[in-house]
Amino acid sequence: MPISPSPHTSVTDRDALAATTAGRRPRVTIARGATPWFVPTLATAAVTTALTRRSGAWALAAVPACALGAGMLWFFRDPEREIGTGRVISPADGVVQSIDAWPDGRTRVAIFMSPLNVHVNRAPLPGTVTSVEHVPGGFVPAFNKDSDQNERVVWHFDTELGDIEMVQIAGAVARRIVPYVDAGTKVEQGERIGLIRFGSRVDTYLPAGVEVGVEVGQKTTAGVTRLDRD
């Protein structure tokens, strides 16, 4: 499956369905915001591999550099997907870590993203981004209860269900959150909206009266898995 850099304006996942219908395999691109990580790694791999022609000793550096470069390409993959159905869909690949009732009637669904998951996050509903707020904080592991105070980006969307809050939380490894869109942007459900480098956690707050359709321990796929139920 070919891998190519993402354009500045991301291709929507509706195009993936069109490609499948037309008999073409959807592309897997490289996530926007990943360049500072994988370009130096791939450059190092290319240089050390070229130097092995002069001396086989360079293989000691070339082999791990190539392995790391391949790992970076895998970590920052950004597959096109057929968008799922439902009022609220998962913004992240990962595993449902916790489901918590909030005092205001909302329900928080926390999804833990491991370094092996796709790191691109998607809009859980169609609507307008009303705010994107960066909040400084720590970097404890995302599975720790204190990770609520980690570095994070808090999103609010104006949707048909009212205000929807989503929070991207950095972890011990993920130390950079890259929003793709600004406040005032209209987004489609499942549209790419940001990246957490090397994964971590994404929380979605379901409004009061909306029943949760997933369970703790369940795997989720961004843009596909439905979080609510009728």
Image (tube, grey):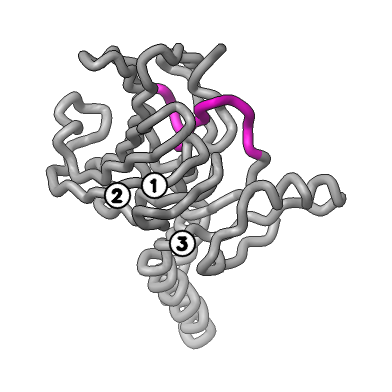
**Mark 2 to mark 1: distance in Å?**
7 Å
**Mark 2 to mark 3: distance in Å?**
18 Å
Q: Is residue 189 left or right of residue 168?
A: right
**Mark 3 surroundings within 10 Å by alpha-carbon count, few (fewer than 14), some (14 through 19), many (20 or more):** many
Q: Is residue 160 left or right of residue 86?
A: left
Q: Can you say whether 98 is above or below 139 in the image?
A: above
Q: Quadrant of residue 47?
A: bottom left
Q: Which residue: 29% across, 49% down?
A: 132
Circles 2 and 3 in contact, beta carbons < 8 Å: no
Q: Amino acid at mark 2?
A: Val
Q: Amino acid at mark 1?
A: Val
Q: Which residue is mark 1?
A: 129
Q: Nearer the viewer, residue 125 or 35?
A: 125
SS at mark 3? loop
**Mark 3 to mark 1: distance in Å?**
19 Å
Circles 2 and 1 in contact, beta carbons < 8 Å: yes
Q: Nearer the viewer, residue 18 or 198?
A: 18
Q: Which mark is residue 132?
A: 2
Q: Position of residue 213 (x, y in %)?
A: 50, 14
**Mark 2 surroundings within 10 Å by alpha-carbon count, few (fewer than 14), some (14 through 19), many (20 or more):** some
Single out the mark in the foreground, 3 or 1: 1
Q: Which residue: 55% across, 40% down?
A: 189
SS at mark 2? strand
Closer to the N terminus: mark 3 or mark 1? Answer: 3
Single out the mark in the foreground, 2 or 1: 1
Circles 3 and 1 in contact, beta carbons < 8 Å: no
Q: Which residue is mark 3?
A: 32
Query: Which region shows up in magenta?
Result: 83-96
Q: Nearer the viewer, residue 65 or 23?
A: 23
